[in-house]
Image (spheres, coloured by chain):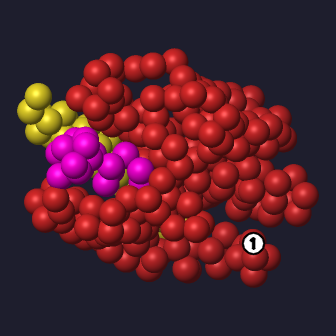
Chain colours: A yellow, B red
């Protein structure tokens, strides 16, 4: 049995998951900090 | 620890640390994965499928390590009332659940060519699946308690009940760890212990790189999520103050 399709699937899944959570976490941080800064400047 | 109880002090450390942890972690992950995929030999018994180990083992480590950290944060929140403990617990939950899911998925993919099956209801796999459901329960509880309180609040939305849930759920961790010893399992026994490793060093060495890389990257994600919760908390507090003044 060729193992490489299994290896590629495992690595692709991991890459997808880690990049996905990196992106959502970064976006949530940036937008929340930008909102907080904007409110502070308004005050 | 109490020196960083002040969110402003914590942020002064977290802001410069986040990109360092992220990029250093990512570099180590890529280096370890490349070495594991192209430089190490195939295992004499498992063949090339052993290369899945370089992502599967760090995922298991972070899935279990994530819940351990949440349980410690819950204890700190309840005993010392540290204002950042609940925030940390809530920030860890999503990446912890993600790594538990990755561990289960990569283990299943590894199992097909090695054991001839995608899944077996044995002690290790079942207890790891229970951990994933515990994460889902914690995330749902934290979200519900934040909604009930009308905002994230001082503890990042982590109520006392949620913190107790994290502490009780930690009972599953020694079960996962000892499952391959207590019950007959398709999963191999403990191969990396405090006394050393039964894995040949020619195959083992890139695992150190991916373990370190994923751990640093996990730290960066937790800091990003903590910063997001703290900023959101600040926004909610300002809006509430403005509404009171109007």
Q: Residue at x 18, y 34 (%)?
A: A6
Q: Can residue B214 be found in the magenta stretch? A: no
Q: Residue at x 44, y 59 (%)?
A: B198
The answer to which of B232 and B35 lies nearer the viewer is B35
Q: Where is residue B211 drawn, in percent x and y?
A: 40, 62
Give the residue furthest to the front: B44
Up the image or down, B44 lies above or below B85; here it is above
Q: How crowded is mark 1: few (under 14 residues within 10 Å), some or many (20 or more)?
A: some
Q: Can residue B46 be found in the magenta stretch? A: yes
The answer to which of A3 and A29 lies nearer the viewer is A3
Does B145 sit left or right of B213 as displayed? right
Q: Where is residue B225 drawn, in percent x and y?
A: 50, 54
Up the image or down, B20 lies above or below B80; here it is below
Write the start and end of the magenta stretch as one range: B42-58
Does B68 sit left or right of A24 as displayed? right
Up the image or down, B74 lies above or below B212; here it is above
**Dominant SS type (magenta):** helix
Q: Is residue B102 visible?
A: yes
């Amino acid at each position: 049995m060729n193992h490489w399709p299994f290896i590629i699937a495992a690595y692709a899944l991991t890459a997808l998951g880690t990049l996905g959570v990196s992106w959502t976490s970064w976006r949530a941080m940036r937008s929340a900090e930008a909102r907080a800064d904007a409110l502070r400047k308004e005050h | 620890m109490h020196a960083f109880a002040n969110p402003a002090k914590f942020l002064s450390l977290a802001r410069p640390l986040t990109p360092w942890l992220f990029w250093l972690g990512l570099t180590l992950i890529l280096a370890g994965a490349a070495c594991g995929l192209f430089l190490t030999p195939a295992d004499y018994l498992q063949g090339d499928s052993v290369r899945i180990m370089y992502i599967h083992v760090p995922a298991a480590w972070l899935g279990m390590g994530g819940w351990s950290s949440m349980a410690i944060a819950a204890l700190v929140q309840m005993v010392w009332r540290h204002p950042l403990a609940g925030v940390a617990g809530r920030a860890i939950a999503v990446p912890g659940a993600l790594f538990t899911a990755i561990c289960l998925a990569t283990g299943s993919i590894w199992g097909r060519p090695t054991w001839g099956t995608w899944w077996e209801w044995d002690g290790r796999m079942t207890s790891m699946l229970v951990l994933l459901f515990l994460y889902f329960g914690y995330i749902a509880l934290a979200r519900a308690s934040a909604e009930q309180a009308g905002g994230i609040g001082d503890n990042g939305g982590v109520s006392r009940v949620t913190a107790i849930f994290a502490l009780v759920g930690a009972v599953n961790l020694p079960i996962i760890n000892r499952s391959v010893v207590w019950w007959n399992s398709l999963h191999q026994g403990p191969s990396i212990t405090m006394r050393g490793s039964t894995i040949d060093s020619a195959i083992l060495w890139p695992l150190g790189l991916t373990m370190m890389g994923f751990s640093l990257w996990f730290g960066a994600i937790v800091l990003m999520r903590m910063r997001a919760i703290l900023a959101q908390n600040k926004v909610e507090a300002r809006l509430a103050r403005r509404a009171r003044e109007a």
